[in-house]
């Protein structure tokens, strides 16, 4: 099966809860791997009994895992600032983690353990062992997160069965995946984002109503990419079914909605072509 490396990285890999699980699981796997498989020549590091060796080597390994923890924290904040990661960029990021962790262990052996082997030889061995230490849990976690994400989506679809002549209602979940609101697509006007909160504006009994949930507008954009709800501004997603006209003002385009009362949303330069293309289609 071919993987499109230029596709956006699934958001479940950069969710805060999953990043915490990623770090904990990787640390646990590394401890077992190091103490059972004993790579890096760990059995020669300390001339002590086996139980004490476990304690010493575990301390070194957990220190190395800090590389992963720091890396994932940086990744989390990078994505939170609105920068999309492609799959190929994520794979390069993982490669950088492997090299950084391998350098840590190589320097440790040369500086503190005075290993007589050459630096390139030690680095090559460290890269191989670090690849095993990280790639195995990374692969397992990616499969698990993907399975769990699909399970949540299927559960949401099961909660909202399709009725005759109608599409299923659209689900709105918070950043923990908990269902907070379900609406017909035709009732949704627009979504407004502010930091880690999103306000859903919709019509109910010919009145404009709002509902706030904890999540990001970027996450909502990915959830709704198959619907007629598109990004028009860094702070807004709009349901194009409710746009009755586009007008040009001095400061750019404005989308006028058929809401009650009428309301206009700005179109930023970044999303102007996307908006115009959507209406052209």
Image (spheres, helix red, strand yellow):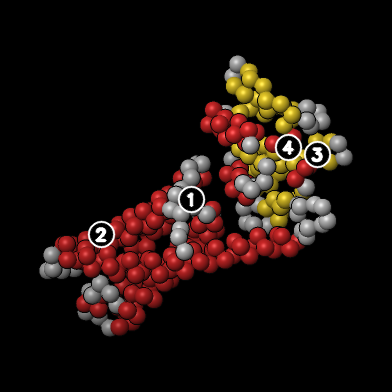
Badge 3 or badge 1: first in the primary sequence: 1
- Report the front residue among 275 and 81: 275
Q: In the picture, residue 110 is in which quadrant?
A: bottom left
Badge 2 or badge 4: first in the primary sequence: 2
What is the distance, in whole Å, between disc 1 and disc 2 at their CAs? Answer: 30 Å
Residue 144 appears in the figure: yes
Q: Is disc 1 surrounded by few (<14), some (14 to 19) or many (20+) residues within 10 Å?
A: few
Q: Secondary structure at mark 3?
A: strand
Q: Is disc 3 surrounded by few (<14), some (14 to 19) or many (20+) residues within 10 Å?
A: some
Q: Which mark is residue 267?
A: none
- Report the front residue among 195 and 63: 195
What is the distance, in whole Å, between disc 2 and disc 4 at their CAs? Answer: 54 Å
- Report the front residue among 164 and 63: 164
Q: Secondary structure at mark 2?
A: helix
In the rendered image, the vertical position of residue 3 relative to residue 32, given as above or below: above
Residue of label 1: 7
Residue of label 3: 203
């Amino acid at each position: 099966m071919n993987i499109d490396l230029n596709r956006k990285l699934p958001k479940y890999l950069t969710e805060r809860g999953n990043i915490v699980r990623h770090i904990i699981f990787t640390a646990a796997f590394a401890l077992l791997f190091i103490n059972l498989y004993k790579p890096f020549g760990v059995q020669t590091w300390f001339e002590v009994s086996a139980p004490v060796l476990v304690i010493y080597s575990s301390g070194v390994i957990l220190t190395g895992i800090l590389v992963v923890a720091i890396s994932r924290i940086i990744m989390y904040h990078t994505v939170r600032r609105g920068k999309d990661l492609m799959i190929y960029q994520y794979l390069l990021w993982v490669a950088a983690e492997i090299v950084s962790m391998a350098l840590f262990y190589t320097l440790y052996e040369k500086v503190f353990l005075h290993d007589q082997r050459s630096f390139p030889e030690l680095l090559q061995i460290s890269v191989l062992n670090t690849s095993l230490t990280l790639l195995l849990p990374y692969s397992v976690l990616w499969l698990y997160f993907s399975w769990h994400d699909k399970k949540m989506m299927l559960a949401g679809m099961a909660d909202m069965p399709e009725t005759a002549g109608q599409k299923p209602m659209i689900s709105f979940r918070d950043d923990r995946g908990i269902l907070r609101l379900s609406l017909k697509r035709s009732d949704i006007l627009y979504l407004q984002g502010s930091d880690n909160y999103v306000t859903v504006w919709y019509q109910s009994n010919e009145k404009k109503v709002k509902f706030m949930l904890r999540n990001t507008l970027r996450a909502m954009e990915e959830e709704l990419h198959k619907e007629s709800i598109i990004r028009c501004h860094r702070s807004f997603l709009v349901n194009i079914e409710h746009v009755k006209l586009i007008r040009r003002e001095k400061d750019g385009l404005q989308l006028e909605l058929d809401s009650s009362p009428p309301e206009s949303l700005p179109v930023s330069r970044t999303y102007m072509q996307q908006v115009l293309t959507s209406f052209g289609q």
